[in-house]
């Protein structure tokens, strides 16, 4: 390719646009964004009581849609392919599969798609050996400090007598 052709060839935009069929708005995402994160962000922007987006698909007239799972990275398949959300309204008449509703995707603020709070935060990753060791060390230090205070209180009368003898 010559330099003139490189300059004139259209560069793909440095982002992906996902159109939300519920709100009619487009949301832009950086390359490398997971589809699950994109769905949860789009759902956060929807109003209360609005149907939620279930997943993202890439559609083109006359072609079978390409569905992105929650861990899939968003990809632009070229001219004519558009990224859009699929909601539970799109399943009307067919019946929405129940297993799609069972696994809500967590979003960064600790809430799930359905609006309920997540029971496990990012900092809670279970009890590990380091945590147990720190708790045991805290108990040992607490008992040692208690022992020092007990010895000080036991010898307090002798200390008072010693100080009274200097008067």
Image (cartoon, rainbow, N blue to C red):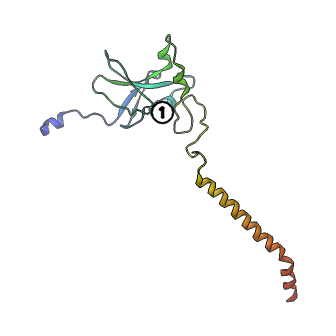
Q: Where is residue 52 in the image (x, y as percent from the top left)?
A: 51, 24
Q: Quadrant of the C terminus?
A: bottom right
Q: In which quarter of the image is residue 3?
A: top left
Residue sitting at x 72%, y 67%: 144
Give the quarter of the image for residue 155. Answer: bottom right
Asked which quadrant contains residue 55, the reply is top left
Q: Quadrant of the N terminus?
A: top left
Q: Position of residue 120 (x, y in %)?
A: 59, 40
Q: 10 Å neighbourhood of mark 1: few (<14), some, or many (≥20)?
A: some
Q: Is residue 137 above or below residue 95?
A: below
Q: Nearer the viewer, residue 138 or 31?
A: 138
**Residue at the spot of label 1:** 41
Q: What's the residue at 75%, 71% (across, down)?
A: 148
Compared across the picture, whether 15 is left or right of 120 comes to left
- Which secondary structure, mark 1? helix
Report the front residue among 68 and 42.
68
Rendered location of residue 137, percent (x, y)? 65, 61
Instruction: Say which residue appears at 66% left-offset and 56% top-offset.
Output: 135
């Amino acid at each position: 390719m010559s330099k003139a052709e490189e300059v004139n060839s259209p560069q793909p935009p440095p982002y992906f646009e996902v159109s939300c069929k519920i709100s009619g708005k487009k949301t832009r995402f950086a390359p490398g964004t997971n589809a699950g994160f994109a769905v949860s962000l789009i759902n956060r922007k929807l109003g209360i009581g609005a149907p939620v987006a279930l997943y993202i698909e890439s559609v083109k007239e006359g072609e079978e849609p390409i569905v992105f799972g929650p861990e899939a990275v968003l990809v632009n398949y070229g001219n004519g392919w558009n990224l859009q959300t699929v909601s539970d309204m799109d399943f009307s008449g067919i019946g929405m599969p129940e297993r799609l509703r069972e696994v809500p995707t967590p979003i960064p603020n600790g809430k799930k798609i359905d609006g309920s709070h997540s029971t496990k935060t990012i900092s809670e990753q279970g009890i590990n050996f380091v945590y147990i060791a720190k708790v045991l060390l805290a108990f040992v230090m607490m008992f040692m400090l208690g022992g020092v205070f007990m010895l000080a209180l036991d010898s307090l009368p002798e200390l008072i007598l010693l100080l009274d003898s200097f008067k």
